[in-house]
Amino acid sequence: MQVIADFHLHSKYSRATSKDMDIIGLSRGSKLKGLQLIGTGDFTHPKYFAELKSKLEEVPDTGLFSYDKMHFMLTSEVCTIFETAGKSRRVHHIIHAPSIEIVEQVNELLSKYGKLASDGRPMLRISAAGLVELLMGVSKDIMITAAHIWTPYFSVFGSKSGFNSVDECYEDQTKNIFSLETGLSSDPQMNWRFSKLDKYTLLSNSDSHSATPWRLGREANVFELDKFTFKQIYDAIRSKDKKKFLYTVEVDPNYGKYHFDGHKDCNISMSPEETKKLGGICPRCKRKLVIGVLNRVEQLADRPDGFMPKDAIPFKSLLPLYEIISFATGTASLYSKKVIDIENKLLDRFGSEFNILLNVSREELAKVVDEKIADSIIKIREGKVKFIPGYDGVYGKPIFDGSKIDKYSSGQKDLKEF
């Protein structure tokens, strides 16, 4: 059976999240998206964990859980804060666990390193290696994924507090790390340029703070499973089994909000080449630019763009349906009734967003919506859309009409202006 999974998301107990981020809301939104498996998120939070125990039903002998016909995996993201080599480090990790009993033990141990009730994604005063060693002491069945590994803040390679290799971050516990999350601002092709990552399996997840289908599953993982179990998913990821792990779903990395370098407050966005010419300094405020994902990849890459390792899991680039409709209709509002009505017409006709994005023909789409929207969906599917790159917390923007990207439309300035 084919399973589309999104392992990384949050609950209403995390900062800046929707009040609908609970088991009920997540189940409803995931069905509309076309997901079959989602992470619970935030199992370290006491109140949310109590909800998980009361609402989720254990699926016997699988290590998975269900609610209203949606499957869940017990997951949580944590932040480790530590100092090494004279530098303060903040790195995020996703914890995947196969049982309530294991989570109870994990939460008891982690409570000694931070206040779990303070946020759905707790801050822990422990090193990355220390965290992994602690978790492996609870159960070897736990999977730890390094979260959004290139994001400037809170990641393994991030420009603000990261490292230059996985080994530097996880030290002697690197042996227990086999999965890395690409994050919205990078895709597998960018990661393939760094040969030291070849032995790891690349996962893609939404890191969603909202239960809407345009946030859930915007990045995801597609499996072909004989048995729908935690172990088979764990094994497929660990072994990088291309027969069972079919592909990941990505957004174009230019769409991610940390792809280029820049300063949001100064309305400045720059490519790595332009940043280098300026010595990494913002020409407007004279402070250091926020160095984005593309720049960090360029710094560490030892292969040319376009290289693909022989055992790499392939990927497909998409964009959430709501956002395709929004850009195609010129609707600026994030929660436009007009866009939602059009989206609902498509969902009512074709069942799920992934079915619409991946499978439905242009002819069938055009029977339900305006041809411009149908064309935009197909252009995204076929990779024929360019993007104004995102930077410093600002999402990128797709250009559907094939026109030349204008720097000034994204806030990016020509160096001659300064």
Image (spheres, rainbow, N blue to C red):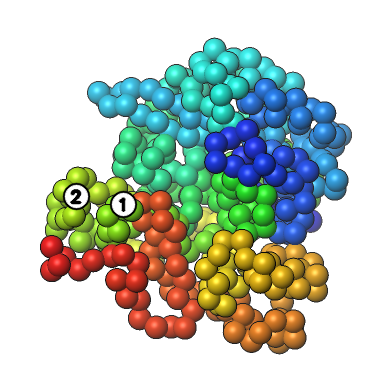
Q: Quadrant of residue 271?
A: bottom left
Q: Is residue 17 left or right of residue 32?
A: left
Q: Residue furthest top?
A: 112
Residue closest to the eye, 1 or 267: 267
Near mark 2 (Cα within 10 A), the count class, few <14, some 14-19 or many ≥20, is few
The label number, if any, that marks residue 265 in the structure image: 1
Q: Going 63% across and 44% down the picture, which residue do you hit?
A: 18
Residue shown at the point (45%, 76%) measured from the top left: 399
In the image, is residue 219 above or below residue 400? Answer: above
Q: Amino acid at mark 1?
A: Asp
Quarter containing the C terminus: bottom left
Q: Residue at x 63, y 33 (%)?
A: 13
Residue 82 spot, x, y in % from top left: 38, 22
Vertically, is 219 above or below 98? below
For the question of whether residue 337 can be seen, the reply is yes
Residue 155 percent across, percent down from the top left: 41, 38
Q: Is residue 111 above or below residue 103?
A: above
Q: Which residue is mark 2?
A: 285
Residue at 63%, 26% (x, y): give it: 44
Residue 159 left/right relative to 130: left
> Real-space Cα distance between discs 1 and 2?
9 Å
Vertical comparison of 111 with 336: above or below: above
Corner quadrant of residue 354? bottom right
Residue 325 screen position, x and y as percent: 60, 73
First reached walking from the N terminus: tag 1 or tag 2: 1
